[in-house]
Amino acid sequence: MSVICDGRVIIVTGAGGGLGREYALAFGAAGAKVVVNDINAQSAQKTVVDIQNTGGQAIANTQDITNYEQSASIVSEAIANFGDLHGVVNNAGICRDRMFASMTEEEWDQVIAVHLKGHFCISSHAVHYWRDQFKQGHKVDARIINTSSGAGLNGSIGQSNYAAAKGGIASLTLNQAAELRRYGITVNGLAPAARTSMSEDAFADMMKKPEDGSFDHYDPSNVAPLVVWLGSAHSADCTGRLFEAVGGEISLADGWRSTPPIDKGAKWQADEIGGVVQELMSRERPAQKVYGT
């Protein structure tokens, strides 16, 4: 991989394994200085060592992204060790899968905290740093890369907590992109599909590594080049997009769209609405199916 991130400082959360580890390794190979964040200290250090063994620069960080104060220390540690910060890859996540009717409050709160609040906490501190730099007259060329999911875009049976969090992240990406461009910050999202500890239980057969040596469609390293490009200076004109990536495929999520309206020009009566809804549904572009249906 080319060194398209030479000299850039990148934080990757959840980088002790799975997709986050592949992102961190790829950023290191592309010339970035990487902060490897993971609550599993041993896994984080292993990723750091692997980056260093190939000539890259990296440090481990084990702070909790769901804690606002600890998230601040992730950002400050990046700046203290490497002199600047250019990007945050919000990747860390967990699953607590259960059908909605049986889901507990704890299972809901845990998933929302790690995914949605975790995206907020670290990005908030990074943005404060970049905004201050901008106001002091420094050129800012910064990146936030968020992680949504097909579950967040389309829904997923047995994952209402996860789908809600990932859908929130997709909307957060749009808002951040619109608000932060003025400071030199771009924000894009990613809905990857790959073989990780989170996906193996649900999709073990579909995602297993081929035994015949053919292209490993669900190898998490396949997603890394897109993430590295998004974190580089080359992606400066791209913001507010949500990419879907699996194997050798890259696509853009097309987003919610409105049908042409039916306008009465006056207040509707309740008994008139049924026919209007039927007409609107006949005009809409069918949504992609909810996973598991």
Image (cartoon, rainbow, N blue to C red):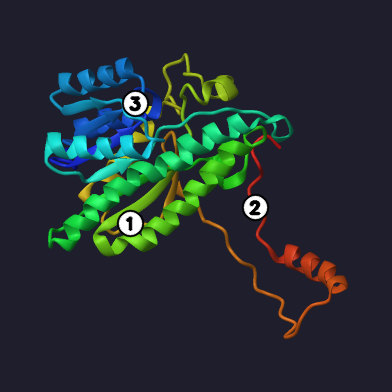
Q: Is residue 262 above or below residue 274?
A: below
The residue shown at (30%, 42%) is 88
Q: Amino acid at mark 1?
A: Cys
Q: Nearer the viewer, residue 164 or 190?
A: 164
From the viewer's perspective, is 186 left or right of 28? right
282 relative to 115, above or below: below
Nearer to us in this view, 206 or 258? 258
Please give the name of the residue rendered at 53% of the width and 56% of the height, measured from the top-left corner. 255
* Residue 118 percent across, percent down from the top left: 41, 39
The residue pinned by badge 2 equals: 287
Circle 1 sits on which residue?
238
Indicate the quadrant where residue 181 lies.
bottom left
* Label 2 Cα neighbours within 10 Å, binned few <14 / some 14-19 / many ≥20: few
Residue that extends furthest to the front in the rendered view of this protein:
69
The residues bearing labels 2 and 1 have C-alpha atoms spaced at a distance of 25 Å
Q: Position of residue 35 (x, y in %)?
A: 24, 32
